[in-house]
Each structure stands twice: as structure tokens, then as C-alpha cells.
Image (cartoon, coloured by chain):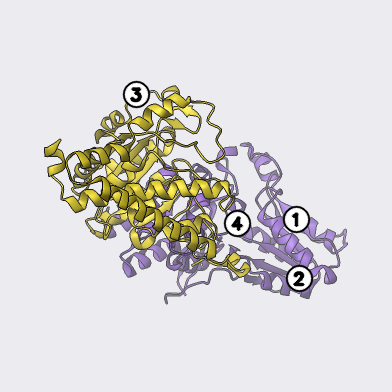
Chain colours: A yellow, B purple
Amino acid sequence: MKTELAQYRKEELLRILTIMQTIRAFEEKAGMMYGLRKIGGFCHLYTGQEAVAAGAIFSLDLSKDYVVTAYRDHGHAIACGMDPKKAMAELFGKVTGCSHGKGGSMHLFDLEHHFMGGNGIVGAQIPVAAGVAFAQQYQGTGGVTLCFFGDGAFHQGSVHETFNLAKIWNLPIVFIIENNQWGMGTNWKKVSAVDDFSATAGAYGMKGYSCDGLDVLEVRATIEKAVSEARLGRPSVVEARTYRYKGHSMSDPQKYRTREEIDEYRKRDAIQSFVTKLTGEKILSEEEWKDMIQRISAQIEEAVAFAEESPEPALSELYTDIYA
Amino acid sequence: MPELTYREALNRAMDEEMARDEKVFLIGEEVGEYDGAYKVSRGLLAKYGPKRVRDTPISELGFTGLGVGAAIAGLRPVVEWMTHNFALLAVDQVVNNAAKLRQMSGGQISVPIVFRGPNGPAEFLAAQHSQSLGGFWMHVPGLKVVAPATPSDAYGLLKSAIRDDNPVVMLEAELMYPWKGEVSEQEFLVPIGKARIAREGEDVTLITYSKPIRMVEEAAERLAEKGVRAEVIDLRSLRPLDEETVVHSVRKTGRCVVIDEAWPMASPGVTVAQLVNSRCFDVLDAPVELVSGEDVPMPYNHTLELAAQPSVEKVIAAVGRVLYREDL
């Protein structure tokens, strides 16, 4: 254990923890705000999966790298550096939101931090991500694109088409399958012909990696390796096995799984395990951890206040932002 | 002025824009080594190399979506669809991504991309290869749609489309590629959203776009022989639609026939007819007539195939109805 943590600087470890906890606090607050009807429509929470976005995106250099994901996007946006105020205001549909209140929960975008959404059609962002990688290669930026999608999206034809394109052109891309095990209410084992998504990479001449998506440092190490390969023109596929605590979206009664299953995974909670590791190694004290929770909680409260106080978009905004 | 074919005009436009801007690249099935399924990209691979003229697998969803991603990351892709029929596999990428990313990101992202290829019936190609699908694209806010009917407009509109910062869908046609017409040697652009008066007249306005233009011009010629002076409007762009040119003409003639080779339900033709009804109702001397493709999948048999499309005879008959003349 000591050797694992010893590879990292303390600040780096605390930064990763901060990102994970910020996502957790943001999502818990978003769930509450949804209950209060401050947020409407589809709202897909990332609670439980924090280690994947936090660990993966931490491996990037966002001055040149890009991130593309689907609609369970709050965590990736925050991990890329989006101000939680802008994210919360977007969930509230306010004009101060990152997308001026036009995108909502599913369509967070932050061009400045190279976060390209926030895409609502299952699997449709996958070829788009390859296009971003194509542009990086074409312009010789040295950048890499991380393309996130879920176990549900894996069965779309876009996966086959894009894996093939990525390999024939050796695009600088890493495909990350966040296998949270439930595609809406359908267990992945029921609908998948393979029991290891990363194994399919071999069929396209790419490397496949598996990692424990509840172990943030394992995610970090795996993605770091995949990203450095991608920079050399070797795309790859990573499966991160994880678990979502909440329903598919806020309206999901979750009759398809048991309370016990969720509790089992909560015992392995990614944040708690990481904190236990850090405190065990005396990198983090109980006191510091409590302080961090408080600080982040205050930051999220601020984000809610900002969203609350922000104005609605004017009706004249209806026709803006459509054509360049 | 030198004559070019429609195909050569498109080729010249792409060639000039690729020479002008390193960010422009062409991607699609058979665009490179094969020189284009319809030879529109002839010579471009040899001139610009495989980085900028990119042959793809048969993977419409994949390479269309990849084009969208390249556009949002700073390039200017020209995506060639072998035909619009095959683009149906990529509709999601155009409708849900290209047309939406700017608005969903609150204006942070722009999507400067051109999707182009032949559209509409050719000959003997049967149901799956003979569809006029412009209405699918025209329906969608966030897209622009152009449908040039002459080599000069094909050149000028493609150049405008490539320089536009929005997604532009271009409707061409297999049977138009060999059409010849004058194209100025001087570089020029044709603005998106401006119709063209193809022929001036006082008695009736005939409105069309894309390939039916020649048939409609022939109908106008035949009508002239019978003393009917028809004005012919070539829309050139379906979105944005040049409402002013249409309204101005119909306010002059008081009678209108719309000719559209698409099916009649929810089509570009009915959109134009509705525009005329709402903005010219007070001056119309007859209900607007629509001459559309028949409401059937295209049959292979040539006689049936021709019967399923607008024709000179159908246009003249419709003009007879709006002029209340049985002698035409």
C-alpha cells in the first residue's frame, strides 16, 4: 500500500479527493434540489462513480486534451474544472448556467476547460469524440481525447464504427466504458455477449484495459498508461467497473435491483475507501477530512445560492445561440 | 464565360477552398482513390494527399459523427455522402449533434461542417436509392440547407457553405452532375438564403429547387408559346428560405404553382405553399397548386418511375388550374 501512495505527491492525492468529494456533494445537493422541483426533467446523478471521472481526468493536460461524455455528465464537468456555480445554475435553467439554461443537466459544456459535453443520445457522442481526436491529430496538437460512455451505450453500432475508425487512423483517443452495471433498468449481463468489454478491443487491434472503477488510483494509473499510449497514436479501450447508487434518473423507482446490492457496493464506497487509505498512511487526518467536507459543502451551498439568485433567461434568448 | 459541368463546378469550389484554408478537408466513401463515386472529387487526392482527402469505411454514422467532432475542435470538414439515401444512417449525427451542439452549449461551440451528396431520384434505381430527402434536413433548426440547380450556383454555394460557421447540408443530384453551364472564371460566392429568378414573367409564379428546374423551365417555355408568361423561381436555399423573393413574385402574379420532386406530405413544397398562402392570400386569384412526387416508394419500372415524378405536362396542367384555363 505504501508504495502505491508513495508514487504521488500529497497535494495530488488531496486534489483527487477534493474532486471526488465535490462531485459527491454536488450530486447529493442536486438530488435534493430536484426533490424541491428546482431542477426538472431528466437528471442523472453520478453518485458512486466519482472515482472514474476524477481518476481519469486527473491524468490529462486540459490545455490540449479533451473530454467528451454522455448525459450523466455532472461529475466529468466538475473534474474538468467547471465552476459548480455554473453547473448548478445550468441545472436550475438559469441564464448564468454554462449553457445559458438551454442545456440543463444532460448538456453541460465548458469549452474553456475542453469539456465537450454533455450528450443526450446514448452512444452518439462516441464518433464525435473520435472527430475531436481526429482534429488533434490533424493539427498536431499532441492532445488526446477521453471518450466516456456506459455499459448501455456499448451495444450501439456507433461503438463498432468508431473503434474501427480510431484504429485505422490511429487516433489519439481513449474509450472509457464506465460499466455501472445497469443500463437504465437492464443488467449488463443480460444484454451483453461479452463479460469483459475491454476484451473487444483486441478485435480491432487495440489494447484493452480493465480497472476497478471504485479505486481511484487504479483508474488514474490505468488511464495514465492508456493516455500516454494514445499520445503515440495507439488508441485503446478501458473498462472501469463501477456502480451507481441512485436510479438511472431521478424518476427511477429502481425495482430492478435490491437494497442489499446497493448496500454491498456502498461498503466499498470509492471515496470512503480512498479516505481510509489516506488516513491509514497519515496523509490525511480525520480533522483535515472533516474540514474538507465542510469546505466543499459550503462551496456547493454557494453554488445553490448563486443558482437561486440568478435570473431566468429573457424570452429574447429563445432565438439566440442557434446559428453562429 | 467558360462552361463547366455541375460536377466540375463543385470540384473547383472544393479545390479552391482547400487551397485557401488548411482546415478544410474532404471525408467520405470513395472520395480519394476512386476519385469520388460520381467523380466530384476527381484529382483532389493527388493534389492534397490522404490527410486531407480521407477515404472512409462504409460507416455513415461513424464518419459523419467524426466530421461533427472535427468541426467542434476547429476543422472545416466537407463530408461527402455517396447519396442522401445512405445519410439516413447518419441522421442522428446531423439532427441531434450538428444542429444542436451550439444551442445546447449556450453558444460556446460552433459546428462549421458541410454535408453534401446527391439527393432525389435518378433513373432505374428503385425505392431505396430514389428519394428526395431535403425536407428531413429543412425541418431542423440549427441546420442550413442549400440546393443549387446550376453549375454556377453549385460553385458559389459550396464555397459559401464551406466558409459558413454552421452545419450546411447540400442537395445535389446524380443526373445534374453532367449538366453544363457558365461559371465565371473570377472567384465568387453565392449567398446562402437567396433565391434566384430563373425567368421573369407576369402571369404565374412557378417555384422549385434543384433538379426539377430544367423541367420547369421547359414548361415555362411551352407556356410562353401559348401566351402565358410564367416567372420561375429557383429557391437555391431551403433553409433559410428566401421568403421575400417568393412573396414579391406572387404578389406580382397572383398565382402560384410549387414544383417539388419530394413526396407531398410534410415536404419543402408544402412549406413554400403555406408561406404563399399566409403572406399572399389577399392577392391570390386561385389556390396554390403543388406538383410533387407521387406519394409512393419509387418503382423500378421506367414508365412507372417517370409517372411518379413531376413532369412538364403536370406543371402545365397545374398552371391551367390556377389560370382557370382548360386549353393549356
Question: Which chain does the numbered disc 3 sit on?
Answer: A
Question: Which chain does the numbered disc 2 sit on?
Answer: B
Labels 3 and 2 within one chain: no
Residue located at (22% from left, 48% from top): A13
- Determine which of the numbered discs, if any, sits on residue B138 in the image: 4
Q: Which residue is mark 1?
A: B290
Of callouts 1 and 4, the N-terminal one: 4
Closest to the observer: A323 or A118?
A: A118
Q: Residues within 10 Å of mark 1 (few under 14, many from 20)?
A: many
Q: Position of residue B112 (x, y in %)?
A: 43, 62
Labels 1 and 4 within one chain: yes
**What amino acid is found at the position of numbered circle 1 in the picture?**
Leu
Q: Which residue is mark 2?
A: B250
Rounded to the nearest angstrom, the CA distance separating label 2 from label 1 is 14 Å
| Circles 2 and 1 in contact, beta carbons < 8 Å | no
| Circles 1 and 3 in contact, beta carbons < 8 Å | no
Image-quadrant location for residue A153: top left
Image-quadrant location for residue A109: bottom left
Question: Which chain does the numbered disc 1 sit on?
Answer: B
**What amino acid is found at the position of numbered circle 4 in the picture?**
Met
Q: Position of residue B252 (x, y in %)?
A: 77, 75
Does residue B261 appear to the left or right of A146 in the view shown?
right
Q: Is residue A228 above or below residue B177?
A: above
Foreground tag (4 vs 3): 3
Closest to the observer: B76 or A280?
A: A280
Foreground tag (1 vs 3): 3
Q: Position of residue A209 (x, y in %)?
A: 24, 34
Q: Position of residue A303 (x, y in %)?
A: 45, 59
Q: Is residue B25 above or below residue A127?
A: below
On the question of residue B212 being in view, the answer is yes
